[in-house]
């Protein structure tokens, strides 16, 4: 069964459309696609084969998913991921892959800022011994020029894009390249789907005990105004194509500790971090530093750990760009004595 793409509704606003394929030979009519779809694309046609405990009637029409609102499909593939029979696949239209409004292109980042970012990246990597690149994150405001960066062919979650950037990729992602409705709406690229705003989807995933708890979690997290952001840009810090808003560091706890100490090196200030295990990269690593102007840590979340290659021994920190000079200076000083002595275990008693 194939449901043709459309260009209406939310999909039209994103300049993207999708074809939803349902393999009838595999589909059992379990209903998980309808339950888990955050934008309520699916409805039902036919009747269940078994009703009120009666025996199976082979002649009765089978209950089937029907794509009633294909124009609202976000391409997030939550339905495909939850289907126990792997009966669903989502395909972006060819036009969607090239969809990008004609608009002015921002000039390249000026050499002075490029050089400064490269110095920051070098310091973080050398002093901390980072295996991966620090990541520059830019949130392109609605109507602003976009950097000259190609769109990825694949749809990515924001957390996946960060993990790709730490490995060296530079990615420009408007809403039609984001795969996670939650992160996309939190970062202001799209409106929040009803099932996410109500907390219902978190209950289906068994992430929280009650709808009341889910509503509280959703209420307490920040979100940008819908469509206030046109795209996210992530890149290795030393190769950022445009001005960064936040620098993300994906590292081991000991390395994150030194970054905390570097922020406090000149002031002695202790930090009040906001972390919950929900919406890690979009809220905790990106949006809180972006809005509050303070560093924040994250332990990751269900989504980013399930959908990316982030290891179990890694955590994250988001640093507002305005704090980077202070942190790099403090880290440089700590690297002269405190860090090497600590790593040499000089306070251990002799064995």
Image (cartoon, rainbow, N blue to C red):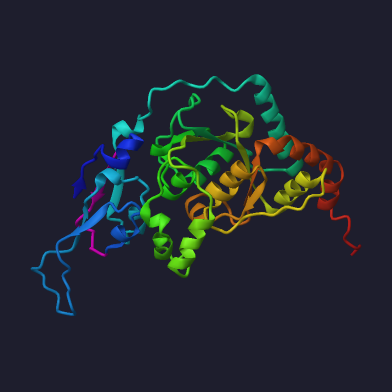
Q: Is residue 302 visible?
A: no
Seen at 65% across and 49% down, the residue is: 296
Seen at 86% across and 49% down, the residue is: 341
- Describe residue 283's horizontal placement relative to residue 338 as left or right: left
Residue at the extreme left = 59
- Describe residue 141's horizontal placement relative to residue 41 as left or right: right
Q: Is residue 292 above or below residue 195?
A: above
Seen at 74% across and 36% down, the residue is: 123
**In terms of depth relative to the viewer, which is nearer, 25 or 161?**
161
| Residue 236 drawn in magenta | no
Q: Quadrant of residue 59?
A: bottom left
Seen at 89% across and 58% down, the residue is: 347
Q: Quadrant of residue 109?
A: top right
| Residue 25 drawn in magenta | yes
**In terms of depth relative to the viewer, which is nearer, 117 or 289?**
289
On the image, the x and y values in percent for residue 48 come to: 17, 68
On the image, the x and y values in percent for residue 72 come to: 29, 45
**Secondary structure mostly seen in the magenta stretch:** loop
The quadrant of the picture occupied by the C terminus is bottom right
On the image, the x and y values in percent for residue 125 come to: 70, 39
Q: Which residues are magenta?
A: 17-30
Q: How many marks?
A: 0
Q: Is residue 279 visible?
A: yes
On the image, the x and y values in percent for residue 319 come to: 66, 42
**In terms of depth relative to the viewer, which is nearer, 177 or 71?**
71
Q: Is residue 69 above or below residue 133?
A: below
């Amino acid at each position: 069964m194939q449901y043709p793409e459309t260009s209406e509704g939310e999909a039209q606003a994103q300049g993207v459309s999708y074809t939803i394929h349902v393999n009838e030979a595999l589909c059992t009519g379990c209903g998980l696609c309808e339950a888990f779809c955050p934008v309520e694309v699916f409805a039902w046609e036919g009747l269940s084969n078994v009703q009120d405990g009666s025996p199976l009637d082979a002649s009765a029409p089978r209950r089937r998913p029907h794509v009633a609102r294909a124009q609202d499909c976000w391409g997030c593939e939550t339905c495909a991921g939850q289907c126990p029979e792997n009966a669903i696949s989502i395909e972006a239209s060819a036009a969607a892959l090239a969809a990008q409004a004609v608009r002015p292109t921002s000039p390249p980042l000026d050499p002075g800022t490029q050089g400064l970012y490269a110095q920051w990246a070098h310091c973080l990597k050398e002093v901390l011994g980072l295996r991966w690149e620090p990541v520059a994150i830019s949130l392109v405001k609605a109507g602003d020029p976009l950097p000259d960066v190609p769109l990825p062919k694949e749809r990515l979650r924001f957390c996946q894009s960060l993990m790709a950037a730490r490995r060296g990729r530079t990615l420009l992602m408007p809403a039609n390249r984001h795969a996670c409705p939650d992160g996309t709406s939190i970062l202001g690229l799209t409106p929040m789907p009803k099932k996410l705003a109500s907390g219902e989807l978190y209950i289906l995933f068994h992430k929280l005990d009650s709808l009341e708890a889910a509503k509280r979690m959703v209420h307490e997290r920040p979100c940008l105004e819908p469509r206030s952001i046109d795209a996210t840009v992530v890149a290795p810090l030393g190769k950022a194509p445009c001005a960064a808003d936040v620098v993300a560091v994906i590292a081991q706890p000991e390395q994150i500790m030194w970054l905390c100490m570097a922020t406090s090196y000149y002031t002695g200030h202790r930090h009040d971090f906001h972390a919950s295990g929900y919406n890690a990269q979009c809220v905790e690593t990106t949006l809180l530093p972006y809005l509050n102007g303070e560093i924040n840590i994250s332990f990751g979340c269900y989504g980013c750990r399930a959908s990316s290659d982030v290891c179990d021994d890694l955590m994250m920190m988001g640093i507002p760009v305005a704090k980077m000079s202070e942190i790099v200076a403090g880290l440089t000083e700590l690297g002269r004595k405190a860090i090497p002595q600590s790593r040499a275990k000089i306070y251990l008693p002799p064995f």
